[in-house]
Image (cartoon, helix red, strand yellow):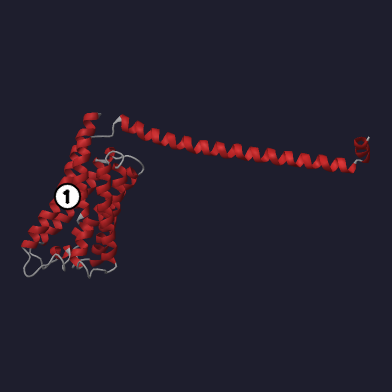
Amino acid sequence: MGAVNRNRLRWGAIAWLLTLQFFVLEALAQARFEGAYSRVDDTISALGAADSAGRTLMNTSFVVQAALVLAGAVLLRPALVRGAAQVAPALLGAAAAGVLLVGVFPTDGDSTLHAIGAVLYLVGGGLGLIALAYAVRPRSEALGTVLALLGVVATAATIFFTTGVTQYLGEGGTERVAAYPLPLGLALAGALLWRMGPPSAVEGADEEERLSRREERELARADKAARAAERDAALEAAARRQASTQDDELDDPWAGNGRRD
């Protein structure tokens, strides 16, 4: 079983490492672009439009990227822990579906599906990195911190890009700040998760122990609250009995004469 997991993690890591192909093919498509092209002012999708000589390279890169992101998310799932291990693959799957739409439907083709795909990729990628950070942080705090920072940067840039706040970095520059963190973060995560291997029994036991301690603290607080409620109820009942006794004595004239004798 360990060997199977190791092989699975190896192929998952390779898939995420290969997401760096995006930068290579983007550079090649830009080199073949006829006319002026600016990474600050022009979007990535412009390299996949009909007037781009490198459109086949760029659109192929998008489609391949979708397969690599999804394959790594599925294969590396056993290396993730906590509840975020369920959320991260789902968000990364959404990002993979988005970049697939971007590649299949260029910006000058079906612009609606292209826009939907771009938003899916950017939103799913940024949030996916944040979820991935929580899913790996118990195993590597440094990796979790780096992924969280990349996710926050990507998510913030996505908000700026989709709302048109691009005057500072340019439209292309803002889009790249939103899009680039995903392949960078996945390549880093894939390499380190492959090196760490599947979660050990000790790590699983530590996680269970943390959960047990949390449950014990909650039970202790509940028990303390119950004892306090019982004490308050007992004090209130005693006060009512004392008040009732005093009222009875005041109503009984013979009890009063007995005390005077």
Q: Amino acid at mark 1?
A: Thr
Q: Nearer the viewer, residue 8 or 114?
A: 8
Q: Is residue 8 visible?
A: no
Q: Residues within 10 Å of mark 1 (few under 14, many from 20)?
A: many
The picture quadrant where one finds residue 44 is bottom left
Q: Does residue 154 lie above or below 196 as drawn?
A: below
> Residue 197: horizontal and vertical position, in percent?
23, 35
Q: Does residue 110 lie above or below 197 as drawn?
A: below
The residue at 69%/38% (across/down) is 234
**Quarter of the image containing the C terminus?**
top right
> Residue 233: horizontal and vertical position, in percent?
67, 40
Q: Nearer the viewer, residue 249 or 148?
A: 249
> Residue 188: horizontal and vertical position, in percent?
19, 45
The residue at 59%/38% (across/down) is 226
Q: Residue furthest front?
A: 261
Q: Secondary structure at mark 1?
A: helix
The picture quadrant where one finds residue 257 is top right
Q: Does residue 85 lie above or below 103 as drawn?
A: above
Total numbered badges shown on the rendered structure: 1
**Quarter of the image containing the N terminus?**
top left
The residue at 9%/60% (across/down) is 29
> Residue 92: horizontal and vertical position, in percent?
27, 50
Q: Does residue 258 lie above or below 39 as drawn?
A: above
Q: Is residue 210 visible?
A: yes
Q: Nearer the viewer, residue 179 or 52?
A: 179
The residue at 12%/58% (across/down) is 26
Q: Which residue is mark 1?
A: 19
The picture quadrant where one finds residue 41 is bottom left
